Amino acid sequence: MFAKQRGMNYIPQTFLEEYYKDIPIDELSYNEYWYQNSHILQASIFVAQHPKLFPIRQINFACEPDSVKFYHEDEIFKRVDKPFLHLVTDAQTNKAPFVTRAEAHERVVKKSNPRTDLQLKDFVLFPDGHKDKLKLGQRIWLIPYMGEASNPGKAILKHYGIEARVLPTATVKAKEAADRFITTEVCFPLRGVVGDAMATLEEIAKEKGKKWINDNIVIFLPTTSGPCRFGKYGEVLKIFLHKEEMDNIPIISPSVDTGYLKIEAPEQLKLCIRKLML
């Protein structure tokens, strides 16, 4: 479409696979369990570091893993100051808007001045947060609403002297927050988690400030290793926390791989577990 109709220099991602297939990504992202997303991440790093390549991502129906990986891609290209065009198509979409958007993107590219000094290590999405030094037992634990199971979790933490709150869900402010942060057609529960969390944090920030939030809040959000997109909720939420200068909020994510039993526990719970083991 771009090359034949407008004479634009366009290279499909698959044609570049030989150049990016060996780029190591284990340290760049956590829990990357989709094969195609691994390729997307490798291709994005390759394009980000190449001085003459600029990204256009076209996805179909917005219901595949790439609708979630978009937020990671966007972060990669922001770090090198490269324009990033994202197109979503389905059976009802006409090609014409895509061509005009691509042409506009090409004009933006010609005016851009990308960075060329970044190394692979500079694309690590989340450097080590040193959760062991964040005194999890002294922070307020925020638990997304996951049905009535969230309330027993809150009760258990409170029993051991840890302040915990279940996030208010599906409020007007939460829906507004989801609309601001989520720009792709992702699964509805992700919109719910992001909206509930960001709306609550914004309300607390108005009262106490972002520094207080960074020093006193922790988010509990379980994860999985696929195939559901639920395993990427923490990654997406962490990207939004970074954008809002709340990077120091740890996200505690026990995984289905261990039956949700392996968890970075607060000091109070660790002491209780040790006593039980003795």
Image (tube, rainbow, N blue to C red):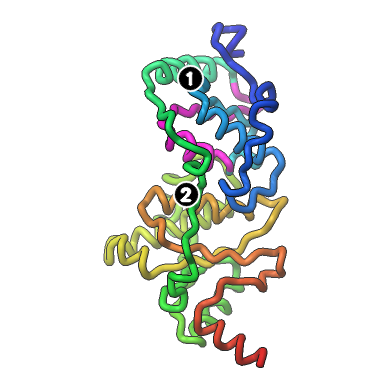
* Amino acid at the residue labelled 2: Ile
Q: Quadrant of residue 189?
A: bottom right
Of 97 and 87, the residue lying toward us: 87
User: Measuring 42% from the left and 32% from the top, which residue is drawn there?
Assistant: 117
Which residue position is annotated with label 1? 101
Asked if residue 272 is positioned above or below residue 47 in the image, the reply reads: below
Say which quadrant the C terminus sits in.
Answer: bottom right
* Amino acid at the residue labelled 1: Arg
Q: Position of residue 159 (x, y in %)?
A: 51, 87
Badge 2 local density, few (<14 within 10 Å), some, or many (20+)? Answer: some
Q: Secondary structure at mark 1?
A: helix
Badge number at residue 239? 2
Residue 34 seen anywhere in this rendered image of the structure:
yes
Q: Position of residue 194 (x, y in %)?
A: 49, 54
Q: Which residues are magenta?
A: 69-93
Say which quadrant the N terminus sits in.
Answer: top right
Closer mark to the observer between disc 2 and disc 1: 2
Badge 1 local density, few (<14 within 10 Å), some, or many (20+)? Answer: some
Earlier residue among tags 2 and 1: 1
Asked if residue 168 is positioned above or below residue 24 in the image, the reply reads: below
User: Measuring 69% from the left and 55% from the top, which residue is drawn there?
Assistant: 225
Discs 2, 1 touching: Cβ within 8 Å: no
Asked if residue 64 is positioned above or below residue 168 in the image, the reply reads: above
Q: Secondary structure at mark 2?
A: helix
Q: Position of residue 68 (x, y in %)?
A: 58, 43
